[in-house]
Amino acid sequence: MKKKALFIGGTGTISAAITRQLAKSDEWELTLLNRGTRSEAVPAGVKVIKADISDEADTARKLEGLQWDCVCDFIGFVPAQVERDWRLFNGKTKQYMYISSASAYQKPSVNPFITESTPLANPHWQYSRDKIACEAFLLEKFRTEGFPITIIRPSHTYDERNVPLAVHGRKGSWQVLKRMLDGKPVILHGDGTSQWTLTHNTDFAKGFIGLMGNAHALGNAFQITSDETLTWRQIYGIIADVLGVEAKPYYVPSDFLDAVAPDLDLEGELLGDKSWTVLFDNKKLKRVVPGFCCTTRFDQGVRKTIENILAHPELQLPDPEFDAWCDRVIAAMEKAKASLLE
């Protein structure tokens, strides 16, 4: 008899790959609980309970009498949401998996080598502080009531719909790719030499599925990332190579970018995350999920992503406001250089 899993969400960047892999599983029967806005992304054989989980009373009625071997919330961002999940699933699941974030780790980083025991503290990003608070609530429920939690900390995970970048607008990666294709410089924070880890969602899914129903995972936190690290210069160079163009990064200090882009939340994105070198140690995950290994190099994964974006015009979202902002920042930097050379 198959084990029963319930995903809250299930069609996002991280969760879609897990959903696709579980749809082929002989071990798990998967049900998604979501609003049904991306029904085309649900594979055959996966059940759907259509509900808005923010309507707790309606969700409770639709889940009445159901028991689960594993429940995972992919869209829990603030403590009130995990508190709601605890009320809904306490006593109704053998495992509750919460998607936190590796951005919760201490910033500034004291040590670039990150393990699950690295302190959680990020003064630059409310998103990360909320994730920390969610973890704290769940750990307290585990300690005092035995609520069977497993905490997952992804880092920068990407899929076939968006190229992972350091600086981009609110509409995603396309405008940066368009600038590259047009031969324009693209903004890169700092000097581009900090090291970063990018994980393809299909690799993340392998580690995640290995933790589902795993007794050794209960009460523990795990980071799931690739072991490959690249500098941001290398990342942008690889993207340019795939596009068949010359890489033209334009380096701007992270704190300056934050100061001149209040609408982009670059304090969180850069000062609280991407501007720091982070090297993830995945030994804990590999002990609990023997054989786990990421097999998609970034140059391989991003090629598939870019090919998919170029083949689907609906993914090519123009962002003229961000494009103009990039031009203004570069012009201002060049003007400052010129004024100091007069």
Image: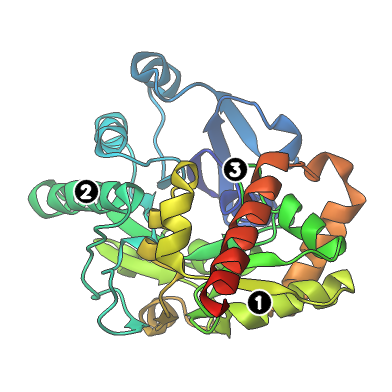
- How far apart are the alpha carbons under marks 2 and 1? 32 Å
- How far apart are the alpha carbons under marks 2 and 3? 26 Å
Report whether residue 211 is seen. Answer: no
Nearest to N terminus: mark 2 or mark 1: 2
Nearest to N terminus: mark 2 or mark 3: 2
Front residue of this view, candidates 300 and 240: 240
Q: Which residue is drawn at 91% across and 52% down?
A: 311
Q: Is residue 267 above or below residue 263?
A: below
* x, y percent for residue 118: 25, 75
* x, y percent for residue 114: 34, 79
Residue at disc 3, secondary structure? loop
Residue at disc 1, secondary structure? helix
Q: Which quarter of the image is occupied by the C terminus?
A: bottom right
Identify the residue at the far left of this view: 144
The residue singled out by tag 1 in the image is: 235
Front residue of this view, candidates 178 and 293: 178
Q: What type is the residue that disc 2 sits on?
A: Ala
Q: Quadrant of residue 39?
A: top right
Front residue of this view, candidates 334 and 121: 334
Q: Residue at x 74, y 78 (%)?
A: 238
Q: What type is the residue that disc 3 sits on?
A: Arg
* x, y percent for residue 243: 86, 69
Q: What type is the residue that disc 1 sits on?
A: Ile
